[in-house]
């Protein structure tokens, strides 16, 4: 979807799948609504059935409905809170249930969850009260879930990235990529996400602010 939540003709998820397949990897796009309880559960179940196990969950869904709070409609508030905050909790909760069940069976569990907050959620952002509130909720959700789910072998961490994406282009940053090294290139954030998703990650309940790698 676009940054305002509207459907786009070409799915970025399909593009990523194509890139992974070209490099010899395996991937599949899933169009489930992450903020829908049943769809989120089916998404997690499908991943386990398709690949045989679940190693990590990256929560990154979101879009914008920017407006000053005094003029914000109920729909503008609810839609952003739903996709960002519930869209993080629903799949994370179902993934946690899967890992908890494995732990209760006596199996070794090394589950990893990475949630995406924002500087707006940590410091606020004028004209983005719904977005800032949702991202603040996500930051606390990282702390809460890591405290509750650690006993099942699950580590939960969060990132607050500063990067040029489809959602931030034209809002915070120019659409054109600068020449030379690009501080706002989202690929600068990728290595941290990969580490947080791996068994090598030995921290939990942490929020990482990252800009430029």
Image (spheres, grey):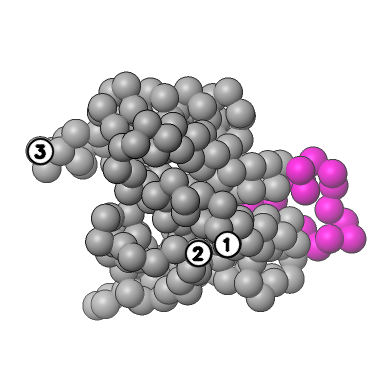
Does residue 174 sit above or below 76 in this rendering? below
Outermost residue on the left side: it is 24
Outermost residue on the right side: it is 70
- Earlier in the chain: of badge 1 and badge 2, it is 1
Q: CA distance from mark 1 to mark 2?
A: 5 Å
Locate residue 10: give its quadrant: top left
x then y, percent, for residue 63? 59, 48
Q: Nearer the viewer, mark 1 or mark 3?
A: 1
* In magenta stretch: residue 106: no
Please report the bounds of the magenta region as a residue range: 64-78
- Earlier in the chain: of badge 1 and badge 3, it is 3
Give the residue number, with chain letter if any, for mark 2.
205
Which mark is drawn over residue 24? 3
Give the residue number, with chain letter if any, for mark 1.
143
Looking at the rendered structure, the secondary structure element under dot 1 is helix
x then y, percent, for residue 93? 54, 39
Tag 1 and tag 2, C-beta contact below 8 Å? yes
Does residue 99 sit above or below 143 in this rendering? above
- Earlier in the chain: of badge 2 and badge 3, it is 3
Report the number of numbered marks. 3
Looking at the rendered structure, the secondary structure element under dot 2 is loop
Q: CA distance from mark 2 to mark 3?
A: 34 Å
The residue lying at 15 percent from left, 38 percent from top is 25
């Amino acid at each position: 979807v676009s940054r305002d939540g509207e459907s786009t003709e070409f799915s970025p998820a399909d593009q990523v799948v194509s890139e992974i397949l070209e490099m010899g990897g395996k991937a599949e796009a899933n169009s489930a609504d992450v903020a829908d309880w049943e769809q989120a559960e089916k998404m997690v179940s499908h991943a386990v059935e398709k690949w045989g196990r679940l190693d990590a969950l990256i929560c990154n869904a979101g879009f914008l409905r920017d407006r000053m709070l005094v003029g914000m409609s109920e729909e503008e508030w609810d839609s952003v809170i739903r996709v960002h905050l519930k869209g993080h909790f629903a799949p994370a909760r179902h993934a946690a249930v899967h890992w908890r069940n494995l732990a209760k069976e006596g199996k070794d569990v090394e589950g990893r969850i990475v949630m995406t907050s924002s500087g707006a959620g940590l410091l606020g952002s004028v004209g983005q009260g719904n977005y800032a509130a949702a991202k603040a909720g996500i930051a606390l959700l990282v702390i809460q879930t890591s405290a509750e789910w650690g006993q099942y072998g699950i580590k939960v961490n969060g990132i607050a990235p500063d990067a040029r994406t489809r959602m931030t282009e034209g809002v915070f940053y120019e659409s054109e990529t600068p020449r030379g090294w690009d501080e706002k290139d989202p690929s600068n954030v990728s290595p941290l996400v990969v580490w947080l998703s791996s068994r090598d990650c030995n921290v939990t309940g942490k929020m990482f602010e990252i800009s430029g790698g």
